[in-house]
Image (tube, grey):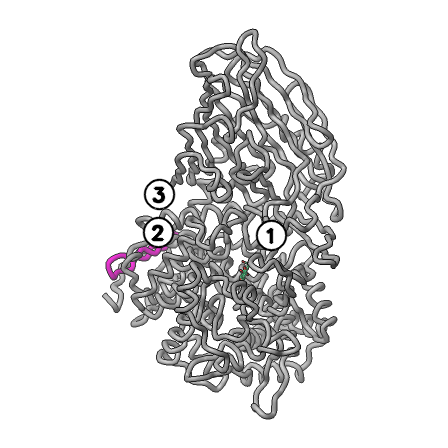
Amino acid sequence: MSDDWTWTYEGYDPRQERLREALCTLGNGNFATRGAAPESGADEAHYPGTYAAGVYNRLTSTVSGRQVENEDMVNLPNWLPLRFRARPRGAAPGRWLTTADADPVAYRQRLRLRTGVLERSAVFTDAEGRRIGLAETRLVHMGVPHLAALRTILTPLGWSGELEVEAALDGSVTNSGVARYRSFAGRHLTRVHTGSDGPDTVWLCCRTSASGVRIAVAARTRVVAGDVTGSRPVRHGDCGIARLLFVRAVAGEPVTVEKTVALSTSRDPAIADPLRTAREHASRSPDFTALLASHTAAWDHLWQRTGLCVPGEAGTILRLHLFHLLQSLSPHITHLDAGVPARGLHGEAYRGHVFWDELFVLPYLNLHLPEVSRALLDYRHRRLPVARRAAAAAGYRGAMYPWQSGSDGREEAQEVHLNPRSGRWLPDHSRLQHHVGLAVAYNVWQYGQATGDTAYLYGRGAETVLEVARFFADLTVWDPAYGRHRIRGVLGPDEFHDAYPDAGRPGLDDNAYTNVLAAWVLARALELLAVLPEARRRELAGRMRLGEEETTRWEEVSRTLHVPFHRDVISQFEGYGELTEFDWAGYRSRYDDIRRLDRILESEGDSVNRYQASKQADVLILGYLFSPAELGDLFGRLGHRFDDELWRRTVDYYLARTSHGSTLSSLVHGWVLARARRSTAWTYCLEALSSDVADIQGGTTGEGIHLGAMAGTLDMVQRGLTGLVIREDALWLDPVPVPQMSEYVLRLRYRGHRGIELRLRAGRLHVDVPQSAEPPLTLVLPDRTVTVGPGESRRLRLPDA
Ligand code: BGC
């Protein structure tokens, strides 16, 4: 049960715990901590995890007889532990109370989005029948990126004596949150040592074994209501330290304990010694009430900048998505070197790697927190030299971005992966998804359009776009039989197909999504070269040794890339239409869930490569990236006619052949169906909205949220429903009616205009442009162009109304 700003979970259910932990994660873009119970460590039900943006480590494991190296986002020392038990007068203390054996009643977790706090309340009963009421509030400070705090109020119910409270730091944690990865090594932290500062504070410091990142955590624990009768430090083996407090317990009188934690790593800016910084922060931090006030103010400011108001349940879910997006990618990231982790800072799935999912994230951020987008583009730009080396090693010029990226930008994709259904380790060819580089270039361009930040676009942005364009031009081969340039031996976003049936090598030819987007990127690269200030153009061209011969070839490739078709639809790749039709009805009747058809077929000794069956949207992503008018131009440039009929047939064709084995799939389908004004759109939109809150991929959310789908749903309203395209220095709008989301308000930042409000309601668009010294805003609607000056409001009737 939830209201607009609060997510509430009632009752304790160990089977739900991991999902709740992921969805109740608190973070500030610098680090995040899962919503785990402080009194429990990692066990069957619980998995406490803390992750800092960009902190990775590499370990080697032996699986199925081969040595495999993996880089993981590291689970950092657990700062949460806080346990308690009753010690009645004259008696020995009972067991520490945990959810597993203290029979929690009235258990409730509340995630308060407006203020960014997680509350938990319950009554625990020990083996002797003594009850303790618990009311806990935690935060990970949005304003001060090092700080977190936990306030615990314990009330003895019906007994008096003494309460023992132990607040610890635990450095014995490993990366073991994903069952499929348990055959891999997971101990990343070494050289753990601990200590105390005065009566209140304990600290722990350690480093990652290979990347050598130093990590320090300091925790100050104080009883702010209640009489402390004694306290002492306690060592927990070699890797943990605690402060044990004895507090007088009087029936019905609450005892309040505040644990304030500072986390610092050697990757933080402007520090010399993380341990010193963490200790200083912990000792100087104000009390919980003051921290809560400054934390709430920081959230308030963020909500102002990201205003999105959609009524009803959809609006409540969208707000949760925005909350988790901001916790993973906040303005603090501008001081860090980190990318977009596909599963947020919320768990260990996909090892915290960065994929192409930023394609679904940056377009939203561009219009609210452009500095965050820019920092994420810089993560890519800094890894340009490595991407260039990867291209060179593969025999190409330009930059070949890795399918999975971590600390230094080398390819982190797996070489083998486990099919949990068959228990077999299988070769993983996903590194052939070169299209990730196109997503990077697309985002640079969109960032430039939304912000007008030409300093960036002409600077690092241009370098990225040109290097990606160069790689894709080099990847093409001229095929005289086709009279076209082709890209052979790659993978598209649909990961089911990685080879032609019975082929001896992986890879497919002419993935339509890749080829069309490559043509677009090449065209944008040429456009950029044409508009770059002359000195910059000469500098870049000189540095890249980019001559006219090469750019002439780019022009040619951008007009002659092969787009495969079959049966009057765009083919996902050359030959897709010749694959066997899949028996969807038969498999649906035999299996409850066929989203991961690839695993089912492999376990039956078959291969999904043989069938016209896709995991997720592939060709259709073109309809997410571009408006029909843009696609018309793009296909026209490639010598094809693109019209509504072709798109309708293509959408229907893939809808019938997609299993939606990725959360990105329903998002794209919902989007393209909404744009095409189809009544089925809402089913897919709803599925995209439910991806994480209802954990629809069958238990994956507990291992980390799906950040691409979360941000993508926000963008579904922002760009999908409004039809917003930014080009030619104007906002183009073409709202589509989706009855279930017919009313919404968006607050956008576009170039120098901060806080433009777009309000859609009953076939009308209200536009408010705040006062500023900016030029008037140009809005292009399907039937007219209007300008709205700073300080002006306009009410516009939409053509459909
Ligand atoms: C999807 C990819 C995505 C990755 C990380 C996979 O399941 O197929 O497209 O990049 O998850 O979110």
Checking the image for residue 180, the label placed there is 1
Is residue 451 shown above or below 246? below
Q: Is mark 2 on a helix, strand or loop?
A: helix
Q: Which of marks 1 and 2 is nearer the N terminus?
A: 1
The residue lying at 68 percent from left, 64 percent from top is 384
Q: What element carries label 3?
A: loop
**5 within the magenta span:** no
Looking at the rendering, the stretch of residues picked out in magenta corresponds to 758-771
Residue type of the residue flagged with mark 2: Ala
Asked if ligand 1 lies within 8 A of label 3, the reply is no
The residue lying at 60 percent from left, 68 percent from top is 433
Circle 2 sits on which residue? 314
Q: Is mark 1 on a helix, strand or loop?
A: helix
View quadrant of ligand 1: bottom right
Is residue 300 shown above or below 693? above
- On the image, the x and y values in percent for residue 225 come to 50, 16
Cβ atoms under marks 3 and 2 closer than 8 Å: no
